[in-house]
Image (tube, rainbow, N blue to C red):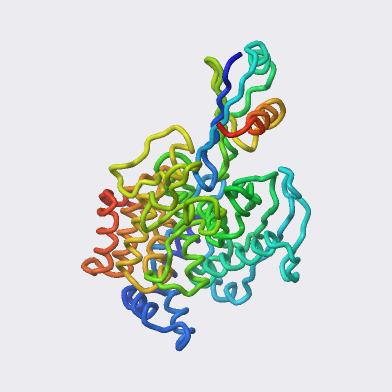
Amino acid sequence: MALASSEDWTSVLLMRCSIVPPYLLARIAASADDRAMPVVARAARRALVESMPVRLARNAAPEAFRGRDFGTERRDLRAATRSPQRTISDAESTETLPGHVVRREGAAPVGDAAADEAYDGLGATFALYDEVFDRDSIDDRGLPLDATVHYGEEYDNAFWDGTRMVFGDGDGEIFRRFTVSIDVIGHELTHGVTQFTAGLLYQGQSGALNESMSDVFGAMVAQHQLGQSVEQATWLIGAGLFTDRVEGVALRSMKAPGTAYDDDILGKDPQPAHMDEYVDTPDDDGGVHINSGIPNRAFQLAATAIGGTSWTGAGPVWWAALRSATLRPDADFAAFAGETVAAATTAFGQGSLKREAVVDAWRTVGIEPAHPLPEPAE
Amino acid sequence: MITITITRTGGFAGISRQWTLQMEATEWRELVSAAAPPPPSAPDGSADRFVYRIRGGRRSLTIPDSHLDGPWRELVDRARSAGEP
């Protein structure tokens, strides 16, 4: 698509959204009860997401995906016809991908817990992105959702291989199967979304942000499915993954990083809750699964201060930041924090309490939000 | 005999595991010289994958989960079946 036409769409979007100010949309979205006024609440949420500083991903996406994220045209038409295209395969305890297909879109449950949990979890994740963030799958162009279950022997992991989600069965002594926790499924699919949007590099602080995006949106998938408010939510990632033998409730706690487990074999949850305890290590791509605790807690604090539900309050702010054209693939915590503050300013207003809540959340974890750089195209 | 230390980091859980293995120094030297050097990093776009670091003597290799095969895979399997440290 030519540069001029994508910029035309930006101005169309801005014009369309200027009718109702964002802070009003936010109020409508938050106050319109989903059961009493589902259409109003949903329309306001959708308009709010669209009114965020939607910068076309051409500027932020990695080279391979540039020009593929112009998902704003024909939105209403597309939204009406959207549905996930799920294919679940079984690797039969080998490490050969993709394995053989056991369940396709629309097929009845197959009676295998891992396959059916993967199918349902991908459906719940698709629903969050579709209904709340108006995104049509991972790439906003209806990319099929492919997953493999029963990967490897006693395999203690779930991962995103760049094209599909892969789930191990666990060893049965420490870990149970990785499809057991729906936020794990949301976490893996979100790696695909991040790949197609900000393209955050999987190393150091940008890598920890990449991990945090997956935890943040994975937690929102679970809370959205359960209809939980920010107060009701557990803010745990991977609850139920550990067997009864492990002293721990989950793999990570977004509310209190470092407290999810403390076990004789596994040791203590190593996540820091504050920038002062940031872990410098060559392992784990520079501690991406460790230092993600810092931005995770910032989201939990902001979401709780803004109130309501995560996907109507802080969620759209984080979503706008992830899609910002000025967010670089090598962004550090301060740069991402700055993007969330910019998005909150647009959504809630410069002097609003909710914008202050976002600033305070980052400062509480020891991050001073940076001012976003001007967009290259402007 | 020398001690081979295998550290697995990364993965969704972010929990490091370590295994050790005793091996004849000549066998280790043959393995290092004969086995093709694995690529140092995981494929683009992937996330939550394990990374193995294998150390013996002065040599240290980093192998992504996606490229752990052949003699290196056998070595890791041997160390794991030898039991947790």
Q: Residue at x 44, y 37 (%)?
A: A286
Residue A132 position in % (x across, y down): 48, 71
The single residue placed furthest to the bottom in the displayed view is: A36
Question: Quadrant location of residue A27?
Answer: bottom left
The quadrant in which residue B48 appears is top right
- For the residue pair B84 and B45, the one nearer the viewer reads as B84
- Is the residue A265 above or below the residue A238 in the image? above
In the picture shown, does residue B32 fall above or below A25?
A: above
Q: Residue at x 67, y 29 (%)?
A: B78
For the view shown, which residue lies furthest in the left direction?
A: A351
**What number of labels is visible?**
0
Q: Which residue corresponds to the image point at 31% horizontal and 66% vertical from the top-left?
A: A346
Where is residue A235 drawn, in percent x and y? 42, 61
Position of residue A30 in the picture relative to residue A169 (left or right): left
Q: Position of residue A268 (x, y in %)?
A: 42, 44
Q: Quadrant of the N terminus of chain A?
A: bottom right
* Residue A77 appears in the figure: yes
Give the camera-side residue of A343 and A37: A37
Q: Quadrant of residue A204?
A: top left
Instruction: From the viewer's perspective, tell me whether residue B54 is left or right of residue A291.
Output: right
Classify residue A212 as left or right of residue B23. left
Question: Horizontal and vertical percent for residue A370?
Answer: 28, 49
